[in-house]
Amino acid sequence: MGARRSPPPALPFDDLPQQRALKASSTRGGRTLSPENSQPDLLDWQPPQTHLSAEESDAQILEAIGFRPPSGEAFLYAVLDLSYARTILERGLPLEDRLVFLEAKATVNALSELPPEQETGILRVRRRLIQSWLETHRDGDKSCYVLVAKQPSEG
């Protein structure tokens, strides 16, 4: 009679390397780089815009005394301390400072509430040149515009 043989002992984790290989190849093959995960071209990178130059916005300082705005809505006005208005004219409109701009009628009303001894300057900008950086806000029944840092294409 022949000798009875028992089956060979099973090796622990005999199929594990095969499963790992299948998992790894399936997940690696299915991955695609999304545009968010890809590294940007550093030579094409542009820093975020932080200021608008006075030329870009057609900014001018107007005297607060005797201020008479033109009719129409072509301009917006910021009522500021005169020295700060001059600084803005030299360095540009800072997008981080959230400058508040008013329409002509609201500017006249704001000027009437200020003490006459205060050195006030009116920064006038052309509305269409800064429109893409403006957000509309309401202060009670008055509306105003706030200059914010965003890309023009976002607005």
Image (cartoon, grey):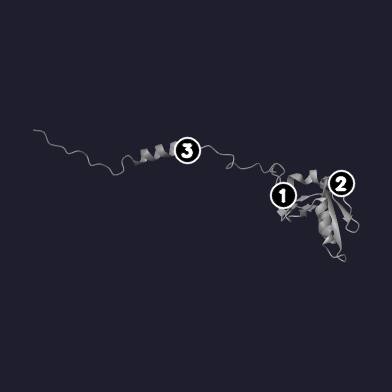
Q: Nearer the viewer, residue 91 or 105?
A: 105
Closer to the camera: disc 3 or disc 1?
A: 1
Residues at marks 3 and 2, CA–CA distance in whole angstroms: 65 Å
Element type where label 2 sits in the image: loop
Q: Residues within 10 Å of mark 3 (few under 14, many from 20)?
A: few
- Which of the 4 image quarters holds residue 154? top right
- Which of the 4 image quarters holds residue 112? bottom right
Q: In the rendered image, which residue does mark 2 sit on?
A: 71
The type of residue carrying mark 3 is: Arg
Q: In the rendered image, which residue does mark 3 sit on?
A: 28
- Determine contact: label 3, label 2, CB under 8 Å: no
Residue 108 seen in the current view: yes
Residue 87 seen in the current view: no
User: Sequence order check: which comes first, mark 1 or mark 2?
Assistant: 2
Q: In the rendered image, which residue does mark 1 sit on?
A: 136
Tell me what residue is drawn at x 80 percent, y 46 percent: 127
